[in-house]
Image (cartoon, helix red, strand yellow):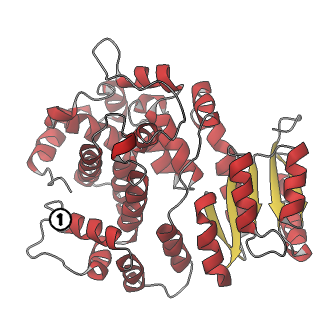
Amino acid sequence: MASSGHARVLFVDDDPNILSGLRRMLRSMRDRWEMNFVGGGEAALALLETTPHDVLVTDIQMPGMDGSQLLAAVAERYPAMVRIILSGHSEQEAVLRAAATSHQYLSKPCDPEMLRQKVTSALALRELLHKDELRIAVSRLKSVPSLPTLYLRLQKLLAQDRASLEDLGRIVAQDLGMSAQMLKLVNSSYFGLARPFSDPVKAVVYLGIDTVKSLVLTNHVFSCLDDRASRGIDAAALWSHGFRVSDGARRILMMEQRPKMELDEGLSSGMLHDVGKVLIAASLLGPCESVAPPSAQSPLLVREKQAIGASHDALGAYLLGLWGLPGPTVEAVAWHHTPSACAEPRLRPLLAVHVADVLDHELHSKIGPPSAPLDRAALEAAGVAHRLDTWREALAKNQMEAP
């Protein structure tokens, strides 16, 4: 951070006109950010040696050290920096090569408000949870998983005016692992279809883009977890729990006649609510104590904070925030154990995910007790406590098969 308390943002592009345009469009942010603009990768690294920055926004195709090389060097030397690609549409292959070391992707020409929002959100991650232990844990991260290339390809296609679900399906169909997961979900009792799907393109059309993108991210995060570094976590059980929670959250919101946008947010948030556990289990936090099993005297959240310095809800929210996921999803992951800590007292995806998570632990005792008890104060504040038994009955009746 700058000595003035302002965040530092570094913009890198070999085109002086682009840099001038960025200066103009971001002039209103000068009282909040300390901004530097440099013309290449070498100059950027030279500046970073003497002046730490919080966010890097870089072009990809540049002479000398290109954006991919710069991102790789920054990821190695300054892992705490948020790394954003600002790329032209013609650079698809270069962008995909850089995906392994970047957190977010924006297309040129970029809407000024979109750029401001992305950088502001990235910087707000440090303040999102108001927990010092989160900052301690993040500073120890060896590597934060980057957005999968499949997700970036979907983003790029969605940025085009004429993108169709069929086009998106053809992209997903090129990834055998993702296609298998897609078909497994769409053919589960979650949807109760009369006949099974066998074509991943048709599955994408049926599921819709929000569900597909959530599946891609979930699949990518769980790919970090293997048998050699699982720290005792059952990956299959955790995956199945996530899908049941997404199902439950969406059903709760549907029963309360919430708008479709909130139904989709509940589904996405439910799938991803425990991604922080994967970060811990996959040893991405570097050498630290193993997280001991929870007990009545010492719940999981307490054990995690003792061993790592932060709990899985905080770590998961940080990761999804880095990836630029929508605020309601980051919020639901951050407070899915303690919704009362988030001020707005109404039924929304956050509260639905919390209830679905607790009820799933109740309905599937073999996965163990919930990390935190049901937040009845949040239910009372939202005026929905009287609906709990109805939701419990509906979720018990409609539990989908483990995907």
Q: Position of residue 183 (x, y in %)?
A: 23, 70
Residue ID for mark 1 = 191
Give the mark count: 1
User: Is 12 displayed left or right of 301 in the figure?
Assistant: right
Q: Position of residue 306 (x, y in %)?
A: 48, 19
Vertical side of 151 occupied by 349: above or below: above
The answer to which of 309 and 250 lies nearer the viewer is: 309
What amino acid does circle 1 point to? Phe
The answer to which of 317 and 79 lies nearer the viewer is: 79
Which of the 4 quarters of the picture holds residue 261? bottom left
Residue at the image position 30 percent from the left and 45 percent from the top: 235
Under circle 1, the secondary element is loop
Q: Position of residue 192 (x, y in %)?
A: 12, 65
Which residue is most to the front?
228
The answer to which of 330 and 291 lies nearer the viewer is: 291
User: Is 266 displayed left or right of 144 in the figure?
Assistant: left
The answer to which of 253 and 233 lies nearer the viewer is: 233
Q: Which quadrant does the N terminus fall into?
A: top right
Does residue 116 appear anywhere in the picture? Answer: no
Does residue 396 appear anywhere in the picture? Answer: yes
Which of the 4 quarters of the picture holds residue 39? bottom right
For label 1, the crowd category at 10 Å Cα-Cα, with few meaning under 14, some 14 to 19 and many 20 or more, is few
Q: Which quadrant does the C terminus fall into?
A: bottom left
